[in-house]
Image: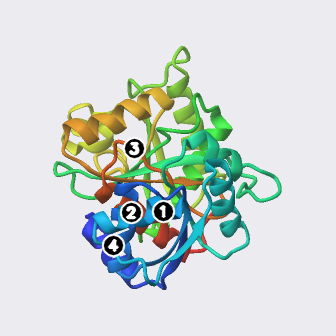
Amino acid sequence: MAKKFDDLLKLAQLKEKKKISVAVAEDKDVLLSIKAAKKFDIIEPILVGNSDDITEIAKSIDFDLSDVEIIDERDMIQAARKATELVNNNISQILMKGLVDTSILMKQVLDKDIGLKTENVISHVAVFDVPTYHKIFLLTDAAMLIAPDLIQKKEIIENAVKLAHSLDIKNPKVAVLAAKEKVNPKMEATVHAKDLRDMNKNGEIVSCIVDGPFALDNAISKESARIKGIESEVAGDADILLAPDIEAGNVLYKSLTFLANAKTAGLIVGTTAPIVLTSRADDDEAKLNSIALAVLMASKGGK
């Protein structure tokens, strides 16, 4: 099982290269990450956007485009549409967001004619490599679903479990987060945690271990769980953290990134192909790590 992002990159190098279409590719950090991923020999890029700007940026970062396909499209919406269509037509196996608003790209993803929608919810999964934790772990959902209900949380878990499996995490431990460890009818997150745990025990959520509710400390610290008398396979050893809502997920995501010196990556999942959709604040290393995740998930044929 991979414990660091370096392990994930090595794992991605063992897979067959994947084609990745980049929507509005004229962005320096995006092209830096594409250059690095190409050097690792894990992708074949198709860059969709303003070819003049793409070429100019590539020159500034010493990125040789002689064997890279570029589709010249100056209109941002049309570039996002063409990049998505490449994936829909199975010409590419991965979609990546470039210098385009998320709303524009997601509109194409949801388009009934050329989009990538499935029957499952579309959710975001972040992967973290934090010096203070003993392995990489996943956090979901910090970017897509604002206030997921119980069934949506079930599908968010299923999406994250598929990604975890592609990272060679065989039976991921899912910690359902809340503000406390006991079920309180007035706190919906704790009620959802119990219901999700029961779904897992009843075989409605499979190929993972779900437990909760957990406060964050119990999910990631065996000592904290011991002090509070919590006995669980998941406590202190979580592979997946399920946030109660987007605010909690987003705050935790950014706290880890900016205060805990975490390395990060992220994907949009629940679609017919993985989507690399990172924040503009994410550097080229985070984007490279996200591409590696996408290659691993695409190698599993993963939705």
| Observer-nearest of 263 and 45 | 45
SS class of the residue under badge 4? loop
Work out whether mark 2 precedes mark 3 in sequence or the reverse, and give the earlier one: 2
Mark-to-mark CA distance, 4 and 1 = 14 Å
Residue receiving disc 3:
280
Q: Residue at x 55, y 22 (%)?
A: 188
**Is there CB contact under 8 Å for labels 2 and 1?**
yes
At label 4, the amino acid type is Phe
Give the CA separation, mark 4 to mark 2.
10 Å
User: Label 4, on which residue?
Assistant: 63
Question: 10 Å neighbourhood of mark 4: few (<14), some, or many (≥20)?
Answer: some
From where the camera sits, is residue 203 visible? Answer: no
Q: Earlier in the sequence, mark 4 or mark 1?
A: 1
First in residue order: circle 1 vs circle 3? 1
Residue 43 in the figure: left or right of residue 133: right
**Structural distance between the alpha carbons of marks 3 and 4:** 21 Å
Quadrant occupied by the C terminus: bottom right
Q: Which residue is mark 2?
A: 56
**Residue 111, horizontal then vertical, whole percent:** 77, 50
Is residue 115 toward the left or the right of residue 302 in the image? right
Q: Marks 1 and 3, Cα distance to the nearest angstrom? A: 22 Å
Q: Earlier in the sequence, mark 4 or mark 2?
A: 2
